[in-house]
Image (cartoon, helix red, strand yellow):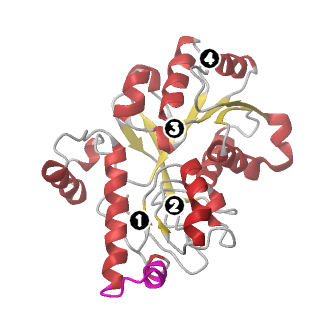
Amino acid sequence: AFIFSTIGTAHNTATAKYLQSKTVPQLFIGSGASKFDDLTNYPLTIMGVQGSFRYEARIYARHALAQNPNAKFAILAQNDDFGRDYVAGVRDVLGADFEKRVIVAPYEFMDPTIDSQIVALKDSGADIFMTWAAPKGAAQAIRKVAELGWKPVYFIGNVSTSVAAVLKPAGLDNAKGLISTAYIKDPTDPVWKDDAGIKAWAAFMDKYFPDGDKTNNSNVYGYASAQTMVQVLKQCGDNLTRENVMKQAASLKDFSSDVLLPGIRINTGPNDFFPIEQMQLMRFNGESWELFGDIIAGEVGH
């Protein structure tokens, strides 16, 4: 009937052509790459229950410029669609100034270390450092920046904000002050200690995944994605044809999972396959992430 929540931009790119040729919907893929919003090439691919990488980068760039209008940017970016999407988001905001205000150091996902890129970026004299990397590269970057004694305003993509999988391996003290975005509740944040949604998620974890790490927000993301899929199945009723599954996945109206941040709603339409278009900035305090500011949209002009 459909494929659900396959993880990774490269993996979904590799399988999309085959699935589309067989008219198999790809629902809530584990990628925020804007390429999948191209309905001509990906008419059966619904984006994941996560923010667009490009939208996310726009939010960071706008925040950085609001604090320092003359800022110079250094970017570590994975050399693939994932990393390039983030760079494109910064370019969207800086426009003609991009070339003179930004230095980008690409790295390959399989590179054993990114030390040389970090050293070069530090030597550029940039005020802002942005890391668009999968968890392993992100953890290495945080540790290396600390080793070098570099103190830029540091933004990190929200795919790599897990306390358990990224920040602890990098060193919690090294991660203090990092800025990112959120769209789901962080189970390590005491503000959600008595939240009904997080309690429901914790009870689900206890029952179905007792060995799962409750500090790893990937487990929260999986729950949000699954609840969204369940909503689609409810809307389908007994009509589980591929055509109706796709129609219902593209007809979500103001749906909210137990674990989405208050104010964030999932909406899709026949020409809008981005379920999540809003995020909120957050800063790591050395122990947990703290939200700040308002819910922000990442579209151009917002």
Q: Which residue is mark 3?
A: 179
Q: CA distance from mark 4 to mark 2?
A: 33 Å
Residues packed near mark 3 inside 10 Å, few (<14), some (14 to 19) or many (20 plus): many
Crowding around mark 2 (Cα neighbors within 10 Å: few <14, some 14 to 19, many 20+) is many
User: Quick check: can you spot residue 156?
Assistant: yes
Answer with mark 4 or mark 1, whichever residue precedes in sequence: 4
Horizontal relation, residue 53 to residue 291: left or right: right
Callout 2 amino acid: Gln
Q: Which residue is mark 4?
A: 115
Residue 118 position within the rendered picture, expressed as x and y whole percent measured from the top left: 65, 20
Q: Are marks 1 and 2 in contact (CB under 8 Å)?
A: yes
Give the residue displayed 56% in from the left and 57% down from the top.
Answer: 15
Amino acid marked by disc 4: Asp
Residue 203 percent across, percent down from the top left: 15, 53
Q: Secondary structure at mark 4?
A: helix
- Is residue 13 on the magenta stretch? no
| Real-space CA distance between mark 1 and mark 2, rounded to the nearest whole angstrom | 9 Å
User: What is the C-alpha distance between the residues marked 2 and 3?
Assistant: 16 Å
The residue tagged with tag 1: helix, strand or loop?
loop
Going by the numbered disc 1, the residue's amino acid type is Gly
- The vertical placement of 169 against 182, above or below, is above
* Span colored in magenta: 237-247
Mark sitting earlier along the chain (4/2) = 4
Q: CA distance from mark 3 to mark 4?
A: 21 Å
| CA separation in Å, label 4 and label 1 | 39 Å
Residue 167's spot in the image, x, y percent? 41, 29
- Give the label, 1 or 2, closer to the camera: 2
* Residue 30: image location, x then y, percent: 48, 54
- First in sequence, mark 1 or 2: give its number: 1
Q: Which residue is mark 1?
A: 263
Residue at the location (57% across, 31% down)?
Answer: 154
Q: Which mark is residue 278?
A: 2
